[in-house]
Image: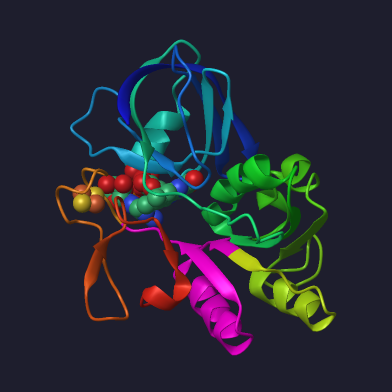
C-alpha cells in the first residue's frame, strides 16, 4: 500500500450520475481484484473517499464513481492534470481458488464496479457469468467490459434495459435453468446482498460479498468501519474486508 501523488488523466461522465476517473500513478501498482483506493479530494478537510479499483493498465488506475455528496461533487469537477493523493491498494479483495472454475458475478448499484476488476483478473481462465442490475437504462455502464464474460445478463429495476428484475433474481432464474457456479462473488446494496445470502444458503453455494461501510482511515486504525460477524465478533471492513464469506457476516 502506498500514498501515491496521482495525476488525473481523464475524468468523464459514463452514465447518468456516474463518472469514470483515470489516474496515472507514475509507477505500476500491484492490485488484486476487489481492492479499493482511498482518494483525497483536493484542498479540503474532508475525509478520503473509498472507491473500488475498477481497472489497472500499466501505471494507470481507473475508478468509477456515483456523484453523491460533497466529495464526489468535487471530484467530478477535476480535470486532466489535477494531482491528488490516492492511497492504494486497500482491503483484501476477491480470491478464487484453482478448483473454482465457474464464477457467478452478482452486482448492483455502485457494486457493479469492483466486479469489472474480477472479470479482468479471472475472465480469461474461468467460466464467468455476470448478473448485473441497474436502476434504469440511463444508469447502464460497463457493458463493454461485462460483455467479455461467457454470459452477461443486464437487468433494470424499471425494465428500461434488459428484463425488469434485480441482479439476484436474474441469477436465481439462471440457477433454476441449471447454470450452477462453483462460487458467487457479489457487491451491491445491503438488501441485495441479504437476498443473495438467503438464496446461496438455501442452494448451498459458496458466496463472497464485498461490503460498503462508511470509512475513515481505510487502513484499520480508526474502527469507523466495523461490521458484525455471525460468530458475535467484529471485523474492520477496510482491513479485514471488504470481501467476506457471506456466512461470516451479518447483513
Ligand atoms: C470499499 C468501498 C468501495 C466503494 N466503491 C465505490 C465505487 O466503486 N463507486 C462508487 O460510486 N462508490 C463506491 N463506494 C461508496 C463511496 O465511498 C461513497 O459513495 C462516497 O464516499 C460518497 O462520498 P461523497 O462525499 O460524495 O458523499 P457524502 O455523503 O458527502 O459523504 C460523507 C461521508 O460519508 C462517507 N460515505 C458516504 N456514503 C458512503 C458509502 N456508501 N460508503 C462508504 N462511505 C460513504 C464518505 O466517504 C464521507 O466520509 C465504496 C465504498 C466502500 C467502503
Ligand atoms: S476505516 Fe478506519 S478502521 Fe476501517
Residue 29: percent from the left, percent from the top? 45, 25
The outermost residue toward the front is 99
Q: Residue furthest bottom?
A: 202
Residue 17: image quadrant is top right
Q: Is residue 149 left or right of residue 231?
A: right
Q: Which residues are magenta?
A: 185-213
**Is residue 147 shown left or right of residue 103?**
right
What colour scheme has been applied to the protein in the rendered image? rainbow
Q: How many marks?
A: 0
* Residue closest to the eye, 116 or 68: 116
- Quarter assignment of residue 3: top left
Residue 57 placement (x, y as % from top left): 60, 24
Q: Is residue 250 above or below residue 141?
A: below
Q: Pinpoint residue 163: horizontal percent, then vertical percent.
A: 81, 69
Relative to 59, say whether 235 is above or below: below
Between 162 and 237, the residue placed more toward the observer is 237
Residue 196 included in the magenta stretch of the image: yes
Residue at the outermost left position: 222
Amino acid at each position: 500500500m502506498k500514498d501515491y501523488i496521482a495525476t488525473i488523466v481523464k475524468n468523464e461522465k459514463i452514465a447518468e450520475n456516474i463518472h469514470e476517473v483515470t489516474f496515472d500513478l507514475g509507477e505500476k501498482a500491484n492490485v488484486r481484484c476487489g481492492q479499493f483506493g482511498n482518494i483525497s479530494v483536493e484542498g479540503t478537510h474532508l475525509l478520503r473517499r473509498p472507491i473500488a479499483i475498477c481497472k489497472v493498465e500499466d501505471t494507470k488506475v481507473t475508478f468509477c464513481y456515483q456523484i453523491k455528496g460533497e466529495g464526489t461533487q468535487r471530484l467530478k469537477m477535476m480535470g486532466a492534470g489535477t494531482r491528488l493523493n490516492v492511497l492504494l491498494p486497500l482491503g483484501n479483495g476477491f480470491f478464487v481458488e484453482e478448483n473454482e472454475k465457474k464464477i457467478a458475478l452478482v452486482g448492483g448499484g455502485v457494486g457493479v464496479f469492483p466486479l469489472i476488476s474480477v472479470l479482468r483478473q479471472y475472465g480469461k481462465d474461468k467460466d464467468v457469468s455476470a448478473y448485473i442490475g441497474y436502476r434504469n437504462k440511463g444508469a447502464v455502464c460497463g457493458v463493454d467490459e461485462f460483455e467479455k464474460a461467457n454470459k452477461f445478463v443486464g437487468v433494470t429495476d424499471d425494465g428500461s434495459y434488459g428484463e425488469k428484475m434485480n441482479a439476484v433474481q436474474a441469477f436465481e432464474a439462471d440457477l433454476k435453468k441449471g447454470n450452477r457456479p462453483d462460487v458467487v462473488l457479489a457487491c451491491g446494496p445491503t438488501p441485495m446482498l441479504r437476498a443473495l445470502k438467503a438464496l446461496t444458503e438455501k442452494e448451498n453455494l459458496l458466496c463472497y460479498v464485498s461490503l460498503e461501510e462508511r470509512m475513515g482511515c481505510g487502513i484499520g486504525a480508526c474502527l469507523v468501519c466495523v461490521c458484525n460477524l455471525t460468530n458475535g465478533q467484529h471485523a474492520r471492513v477496510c482491513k479485514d474486508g471488504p470481501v467476506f464469506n457471506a456466512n461470516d457476516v451479518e447483513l
